[in-house]
Amino acid sequence: MQPLAVFSVNLVSDNLLLLASVLVFVAVLITKVGVKLGAPSLLLFLLLGMAVGREGLGLNFEDYEIAESIGHFAMTVILFTGGFETILHETKPVMKKGIMLSTVGICITVILTGFFIYFATGRIIADTGVSILACFLVAAVMSSTDSTSVFSVLNGKRLSLRSNLAPLLELESGSNDPVAYILTILMVKFMTEPSLQGLSTWVGALAGIIVVLIQILVGVAVGFGVGFGAKWLLSKIRLENNSLMGILVLSTGFFANGLASLLGGQGLLSIYIAAVIISNKADIPRKKEIAKFFDGITWIMQLAMFLILGLLARPSSMVQVALPAILTGLFLLFVARPASVFLTLAPFKGVKFKEKLFVSWVGLKGAGPILFALYPVVHEVQGAGDIFNVVFIVSLMSLILQGMSLTPVAKWLNLSYPEDPEVESFGMELPEEMGMLSDHIVTPDDLSAGKTLRELHLPHGIRVMMVKREGKFLVPHGSMELMEGDHLIIVMGESDD
């Protein structure tokens, strides 16, 4: 199909903003469909990009370098927001497990999947003669639990998980994307640089291990350094404008990413660690409002990244690798990922079988692996087009099979709490030392002893601050008559009476 003239992409054309506005508008609307179907919004963004692409409506976009640059920038923002929303005291009990999953677990996944591709699925990468290195490259690209998908699905579905599973999954996905990216870059270098191709297997493996360790250690050091440096800096700076304060905080994350890359470390790991430290250690005024600011930017980044990756997809070119890609995806979902989780968590006592099973099922793929698959394309690795197609198919499978089933699986394994209604805070925020805000919807049982607020006989330390009724906000008083369905905003704290 020839691209329609109005859909020709030129970054300086007048059509760009028109096209972008229409795509964003439609993408936001289809999230409503996703909620009803139980499908992750990110999957719908990806499918929308495919639908309007060259083999759909005809929007022609083939600039892989720009796509990789946009995707990498989007991922830094997403990882920073994920780190900023990480609550350290909840993450500490699962810190060792998360780190083991994001390092040892990744290596096990790569080894198992790489050998499976080499021995079982045949010529996935036709132009390379199915070299073992090429097979491990495909495995490395697909090895990580995609942070974008995990953060989005867990928050979007409002899953309240037992046994500290949510912090474990968020920590793993936030820290294993950088590890997978390091392995991808390493494999590409071994395949493209003549000076490395002559190394023996053991020398090459040793060199690879050293490079990975250096990148991780430098990334961690820079993340901690910038994080605590930002803590000191933010204690000296106070900005009244929340958006400017948010931009200042985000800039420290970008600095961590750039500095780590400059020093030979992994920038994605640095920005995640820096964000965790800044959020949990720095004194940031109006932190919740800034977090909402980050959340809005993250949605824009996710939407743009998935749309662009969808635009790059060519379904017709995926047909020839569809069968081996599906087989590889099934092996990854049902063998390699569970094996890596069970083996990695085996030394940890107290982790139940069903918890390991659920962690295995949350090995979501998504934008991360597809983005990493662009790296071989940009660096002109032989068979890179087939690698991209294989990874794209596997990511689609993961988003459909795993992303759409997380809630039922969590309920089936009895690992999720009953879903609570979303707390309505009416835009108000209290300092933690003053207590916490909660929302309560008046039920018939509440009114059984009397209809006035005074007759509710609320416990000590609980005060009703405001009542919302039919869209109107009412100031409460003792003789106010309440109605079923009223929203009461309550502050809970210490009382001196």
Image: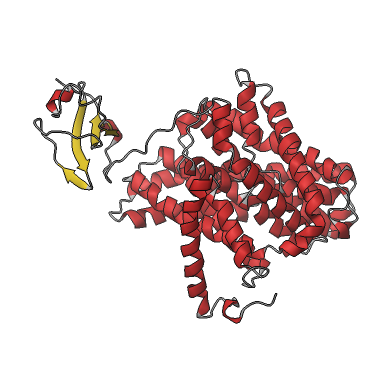
Please name the residue shown 49% across and 47% down the image. Answer: 36
Asked if 152 appears above or below 419 in the picture, the reply is below
Count all numbered tags in the image, as a single digit: 0
Asked if 495 appears above or below 138 in the picture, the reply is above
Please name the residue shown 74% across and 46% down the image. Answer: 140
- Residue closest to the eye, 34 or 288: 34
The x, y position of residue 325, in whole percent, is 78, 50
Q: Is residue 364 left or right of residue 418?
A: right
- Is residue 228 something that shows in the picture? no
The x, y position of residue 392, in whole percent, is 70, 54
Please name the residue shown 21% across and 42% down the image. Answer: 469
- Is residue 24 something that shows in the picture? yes
- Residue closest to the eye, 288 or 325: 325
Quarter of the figure with the N terminus = bottom right
The x, y position of residue 346, in whole percent, is 69, 23
Asked if 494 appears above or below 363 in the picture, the reply is above
